[in-house]
């Protein structure tokens, strides 16, 4: 849950990543957050 605010979840509030393209892993890990950077994120695991 530590990275929940940085992964761009729809419920994390008004953040810039909220407007990014759909996440590549499922519900976490968007284009600004590649899988090698956060291998433990939801969807990137």
Image: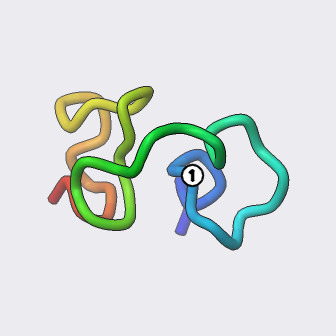
Question: Which residue lies most toward the right here?
Answer: 14
Q: Residue at x 57, y 52 (%)?
A: 8
How is the protein colored in the picture?
Answer: rainbow
Left or right, 7 with reference to 40: right
The total of numbered circles placed on residues is 1
> Observer-nearest residue: 23 or 7?
23
Residue at the disc numbered 1 = 8
Task: Tell me where residue 27 sits by quadrant.
Answer: bottom left
Left or right, 39 with reference to 41: left
> Observer-nearest residue: 5 or 21?
21
Quarter of the picture containing the C terminus is: bottom left
Where residue 17 appears, as percent x and y from the top left, is 62, 39
Element type at marker 1? loop
| 45 shown above or below 18 | below
- Crowdedness of circle 1 by 10 Å Cα count: few (<14), some, many (20+)? many
Where residue 7 appears, as percent x and y from the top left, is 51, 50
Q: Residue at x 21, y 46 (%)?
A: 39
């Amino acid at each position: 849950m530590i990275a929940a605010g940085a992964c761009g979840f729809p419920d994390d509030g008004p953040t810039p990543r909220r407007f990014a393209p759909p996440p590549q892993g499922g519900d976490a890990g968007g284009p600004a957050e590649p899988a090698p950077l956060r291998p433990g994120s939801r969807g990137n695991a």
